[in-house]
Image (cartoon, rainbow, N blue to C red):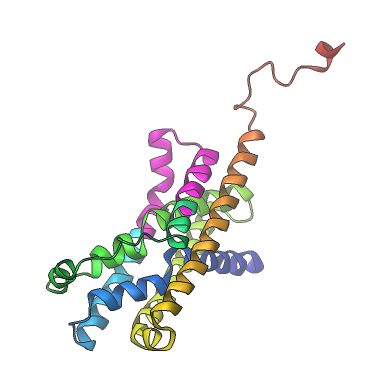
Amino acid sequence: MTGNFLSYIGWTVATLLPIINPISAAGMLIGITGQLTTVERNRQITMACIYMTGILLAFLLAGVLIMDLFGISIPGLRIAGGMIVAFLGFRMLFPQENALDTDSDIEARQKMDISFTPLAMPGLSGPGSIALVITMSTTVQQSGALSTTMTYVVISIGIVITAIIIWFCLRAAGLLNRVLGANGIAAMSRIMGFLMVCIGVQFVINGIQDLLHDPDFWPASFPPAASDTH
């Protein structure tokens, strides 16, 4: 039980980090907080990590209710979540040249609180991480390795640990920028994007496998009964 508990915590952290991409978030932070003092920037980072944790925990707890309300199946959720994750990974692998904000946009944001938008959402807790949290909870529950309550506890702990790691990464954003430079950050972002594509494709594969093994998916006459083949 303890082994499953720790392994699923590690799995949650290892899966969320490429999706959230703290290196890319650090680059965005440097770009939109250039005129802020160190104290103010650190306060924005702390609040953004708190908001991110609250958003992901809310979707973790309400995700199953949302699925029941809209009649979404587990295979469908896994396939859709995998497609979103893969799409975001492709965007990181092949960024658009015009995706950067203009100087006027950056100056306007510097006068506002950027901890919730754009830093926490969609920067840290975007559609990819939200879909991933819901998908992970259903995956663990379906595996039967942990009870429903323990599943929520394990993934919640993983979310909190991920938020702490991201907090340290963002606090070191200035040092990261000096060490890696613009080209280094772009390269690391593409590596994260490749990992996201791999994770997304794997989720789609798992969803298709679950769909093919779901007896409700096939017509009642398929596959043919043994007596029908003679």
Q: 24 above or below 61?
A: below
Residue 118 or residue 96, whichever sits in front? 96
Task: Tell me which segment is drawn in magenta.
Answer: 56-85
Q: Quadrant of residue 42?
A: bottom left
Residue 74 or residue 100, whichever sits in front? 100
Residue 45 visible somewhere in the drawing = no
Give how far across and how far down residue 156 sits, in percent.
Answer: 45, 63
Residue 107 on the magenta span:
no
Q: 179 above or below 90?
A: below
Q: Quadrant of residue 57?
A: bottom left
Q: Is residue 168 left or right of residue 149?
A: left
In the rendered image, the residue lying farthest to the right is 230
Q: Is residue 212 left or right of residue 152?
A: right
Q: Is residue 10 left or right of residue 130?
A: right
Give how far across and how far down residue 214 sits, in percent.
Answer: 63, 33
Residue 69 on the magenta span:
yes
Residue 76 visible somewhere in the drawing = yes
Chief secondary structure of the magenta portion: helix
| Quadrant housing the N terminus | bottom right
Number of numbered discs: 0
Q: Quadrant of residue 115?
A: bottom left
Residue 175 or residue 207, whichever sits in front? 175
Give how far across and how far down residue 88 sits, in percent.
Answer: 43, 55
Residue at 38% x, 79% y: name it: 182
Give how far across and how far down residue 194 sits, in percent.
Answer: 53, 62
In the rendered image, the residue lying farthest to the front is 97
Residue at 43% x, 33% y: name it: 71
Q: Is residue 71 left or right of residue 78?
A: left
| Quadrant housing the C terminus | top right
Q: 78 above or below 88?
A: above
